[in-house]
Image: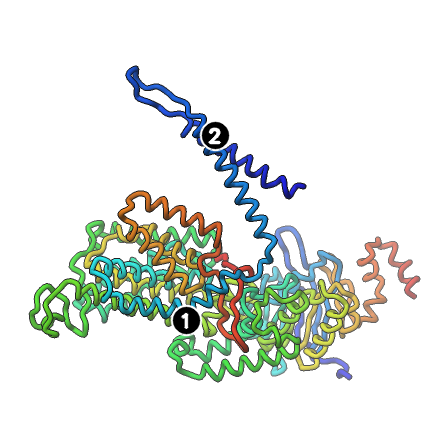
Amino acid sequence: MNPPAPAPLLEVVDLTMRFGGLKAIDQLSFVARRGEITAVIGPNGAGKTTAFNCITGFYRPSSGALRLTHADGRIFQLERLPGHRIARRAGVARTFQNIRLFAGMTVLENLLVAQHAPLMAATGFGVLGVLGLGGYAAAERRAIAKARAWLERIDLMARADAPAGALPYGAQRRLEIARAMCTDPVLLCLDEPAAGLNPRESEELNTLLLRIRDDGCSLLLIEHDMGVVMRISDHIIVLDHGRKISDGTPAEVRADPHVIAAYLGEGDEGIEQETESVA
Amino acid sequence: MTRAKAPLVDAFLSALIALGLFAPMVGLVTMVGPHGITLTARPRAVLALVAAVFVGRLALRLWQAQRRLVPAAPGRFAITFLAAARYIGPVLLAVALVLPALVGRARLDLGVLVLTYVMLGWGLNIVVGLAGLLDLGYVAFYAVGAYSYALIAEASGLGFWSCLPVAGLLAALWGVTLGFPVLRLRGDYLAIVTLAFGEIIRIVLLNWVSLTNGPNGISGIPRPTLFGLRFTAGDGPGTFAGFFHLAPSPTQRVVFLYYVILGLALLTNWVTIRLRRQPLGRVWEALREDEIACRSLGINVTTTKLTAFAVGAFFGGIAGAFFATRQGFISPESFTFMESATVLAIVVLGGMGSQLGVVLAAVVMIGGPELFRPLADDRMLIFGLALVVMMVLRPRGLISVRTPSIALGKATVISADFVTEGHG
């Protein structure tokens, strides 16, 4: 269904991240293509979250380039942008491994905070808004309409006025994704979205993520749940000890002896045997 | 088994501490007798005190254990209180409006003082309560506002109303200047540095004698006028008494000052309430909840914190200008750390982020000690006791629930269990 080679959206070139003497990521290069779900997998401590933090601007990479190309041809060098610009200008949104909602604010407020930039511009940077002038009312109506649309989609309309911290875990996950989507990203980065979900919730998540992809937002996800990864990913990158050890479609990655070795923790001599058994 | 034993052990340990404390302090009395000083033991008194501590502690622990079984859903007290709060606000406002007709000049002067602290509390509430930035140096902005007004009025001959916005803006500018380097810090570190900045301002005011007249302060600060009408002891032309053909009385000026500060405080409140329902205020609260999440949503954390600092400082500066014009004299002594601590205590006692809480706390914190002045030193004891009771019963302040800034349906309050207090 997809064209043979969709245009690259995010190109990671020789990304290296050092913490003192430790190389958390070593010369990592990969491409996430537009309109695809790209998954980054790997054993614990492989450097997945570190790579994510570099892409979303929470860490500044030690070296390497992160190039994001928009559909209109604009190019952003993510490694040079300050954190908040990556989300606002370059359009990279993210969720967190340990959910980071505004727990004391309502579900609706969470979605409105995500639309801060356009709303703030409509208030004339606070001044006109206080005086009740300018087009703020209209902007707020639009923001609420968008929030409503997302609430319908993640099935939280009934809890719109409840504090986000009071939602059950699965709903908090969905809300965090919706909140990230309210920033109108071109690339949504999800850090273990299926962690702690039961099979049914996990299935709903798959549907939600596929729908987000089909609506035109590309996804990059870190995931441990292989059921989720293998079913929805278009492309998988496998990391181990900060290096890329495999890169390809789910079927290719599943058959890659390096991947099996990394996950099962076998030595180099085991690889040949694994290759034979897979074949 | 352990559940039943724990309170007993705890009570026993408390009793042991009490024994250690009371044995020398209460148990031994020096008596001046005919043969010099003698030491008398009072074992019964000690025993009674220790027993009281044991029983009291046991009762407290058992009561707490009982309470823990109740689900931590939004407190019933909080809900009823908030239902009542809808009426408390307007009632308080009505009382505030007619107060000059009800009380004498001395009490009204106290009202002016309380309202000044209400305004300061509302200003600091923006920084601490909404944005969650612990500022221990709020008095710096108060001082900047007061000195700005005093110095500008002295140098330019402009009146109170022309200088007022300038004083506010200068304080806001100072807020931004201070905030820029400081806001990289978080939590305790932010608190320490803001504390230091507050002290720096005071010490500069103290030592820059050529500008501020040092410890002697500035006197003869112009009084505010009502559309150019002055409040003086005489009733000559251009005075309030003369214009309205009234007998000149010092009460008129106090009443006028009272309404000025009431208006300024209400302006602070109005702006805060408006801002809270707007993206800026909402993002302040989001910042208090989770700064990292804010960053991931494309919010510029630094400028957002700066706006909170600047708006808070603006109102602090206005309150400072009012203080200067009310006193007619200012010196660095009025801007010690105690002021910052008092205002912060008002915000925390009221319940962080709650506008009504600030009013109640200011009345209790400022009005209380003044009203109970006849009790002399005991009032501080009562005050301390009240604070301890508050900490046990309502650790999140008088009004600890959060009202959502926007709702699709019916807005319900959010229990303090969900709301973050902010870590800078």
What amino acid is found at the position of numbered circle 1 in the picture?
A: Ile
Can the viewer see residue A72?
yes
Image vertical order of residue B8 relative to residue B311, above or below: above
User: Is A217 placed left or right of A122 in the picture?
Assistant: right
Q: Report helix, strand or loop for mark 2.
A: helix
| Residue at the outermost left position | B236
- From where the camera sits, is residue B291 visible? no
Q: Name the residue under label 2.
A: B47
| Residue indicated by mark 1 | B273
| Residue A136 placement (x, y as % from top left) | 45, 81
Image quarter of residue B105: bottom left
For mark 2, name the chain.
Answer: B
B252 or B286, nearer to the observer: B252
Three-letter code, disc 2? Leu
Label 1 or label 2, whichever lies nearer to me, is 2
**Label 2: how many residues lie within 10 Å, few (<14), some (14-19) or many (20+)?**
some
Of residues A194 and B86, the one nearer the viewer is: B86
User: Where the N terminus of chain B falls, by quadrant?
Assistant: top right
Seen in the picture, residue B90 relative to B383 is either above or below; the reply is below
Residue B371 rendering spot, x and y as whole percentages: 29, 53
Left or right: A173, with B331 as reference point: right
Q: What element carries label 1?
A: helix
Residue A114 lies, in percent from the top left, at 55, 73
Image quarter for residue A130?
A: bottom left
Circles 1 and 2: CB atoms closer than 8 Å: no
Mark 2 or mark 1, which is nearer the start of the sequence? 2
Residue B255 image offset from top left, x and y in percent: 21, 66
Q: Distance between the residues labelled 1 and 2?
A: 55 Å
- How packed mark 1 is, by other alpha carbons closer than 10 Å (few <14, some 14-19, many 20 or more), is some
Left or right, B352 with respect to B162, comes to right
